[in-house]
Amino acid sequence: MGAMEVIIQSDKRQASLLGARIIARQVQKKPNAALGFATGKTPLLLYQFLVQMHREKELDFSRVTAFNLDEYIGLDPSHPASFHSYMWQNLFGPIAIREDKVNIPNGMAADIPAACRKFEETIKSSGGIDIQILGIGRDGHIGFNEPSSSLTSRTRIKTLTAETRRDHGQEFGGDEKVPFHVITMGLGTIMEARTCLLLAFGKEKARPIAQTIEGPITAMVPASILQLHQRAIVLLDEEAAAELTKIDYYRWVYGHKPDWQKY
Ligand code: GLP
């Protein structure tokens, strides 16, 4: 089954809650699920909902394996702008994921290609990622797969664009302090996740979202490869959905979802 499901919610709170419910279902069904996480502002509310579910004892993450999309090269994991710090602070700490089950690309590795290969092997030996959470960059990137990334790429080193470095300047206290290089899961790696959950909120995401869902599949919009994914769920608020030409149809489809398919 190949499918991209576009779900438009009134606001990011509703969309994030639905996303958290999809994750919760997966963990309830398969307590040792492998989940793929993303960083950035977009998934923060979804993570807060997962933390709340954990606190209310609805969800147990003790057997879950975690993978992360990307990390800066040469940045100590303890640096406040590292994705390690972000994940432990916003999610892994509060939901008590076991440290030995957390896999974030190692940007401090002496041998980066070897670290990338090992990361891919760990995904395979865990049985593959059940749900990969994704945000999207303003230029259509997912993970740190910048425009022109190979559509079949694996975990590897990438050089950030000037635009993406500027987008992260605030976290580093200045654009010039943002690293130039990162390790990111490849588009081929992401495509192997059994489900991809792409979240996008706000008007600055309207254009990349329209290109991703309705544009041609192209390396210039890396997220557009998701059109070929076996199960990609796209959760949007009204602003991020604003440039979709088939918006009425997506609402119609979701409104008529058969009961047995509902989340
Ligand atoms: C970074 C991350 C992506 C993320 C994107 C958008 O580039 N590597 O995984 O999706 O930023 O970030 P935000 O959610 O803050 O808009």
Image: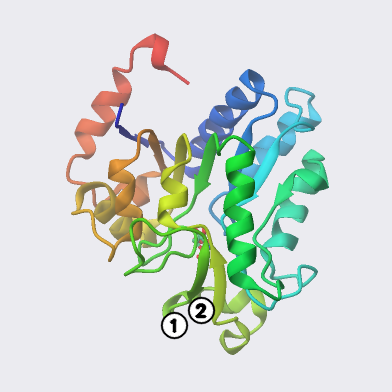
* Left or right relative to 231: residue 95: right
Residue at label 2? 165
Q: Does the residue labelled 2 lie within 8 Å of ligand 1?
A: no
Q: How crowded is mark 2: few (under 14 residues within 10 Å), some or many (20 or more)?
A: many
**Front residue (pair 11, 144):** 144
Image coords of residue 211 (percent x, y): 25, 55
Image coords of residue 35 (percent x, y): 61, 39
> Residue sitting at 41 percent across and 55 percent down?
187
- Determine if residue 200 is in view: no
Do labels 2 and 1 touch, CB within 8 Å? yes
Q: In this view, does 167 lie above or below 195?
A: below
Residue at label 1? 162
* Left or right relative to 110: residue 184: left
> Residue sitting at 47 percent across and 34 percent down?
194
Say which amino acid is labelled 2: Arg
Say which amino acid is labelled 1: Ala
Which quadrant of the figure contains the N terminus? Answer: top left
Separation of residues labelled 2 and 1 (CA atoms): 5 Å
- Determine if residue 77 is in view: yes
Q: What element carries label 2?
A: helix
Image coords of residue 114 (percent x, y): 62, 66
Q: Is mark 1 on a helix, strand or loop?
A: helix
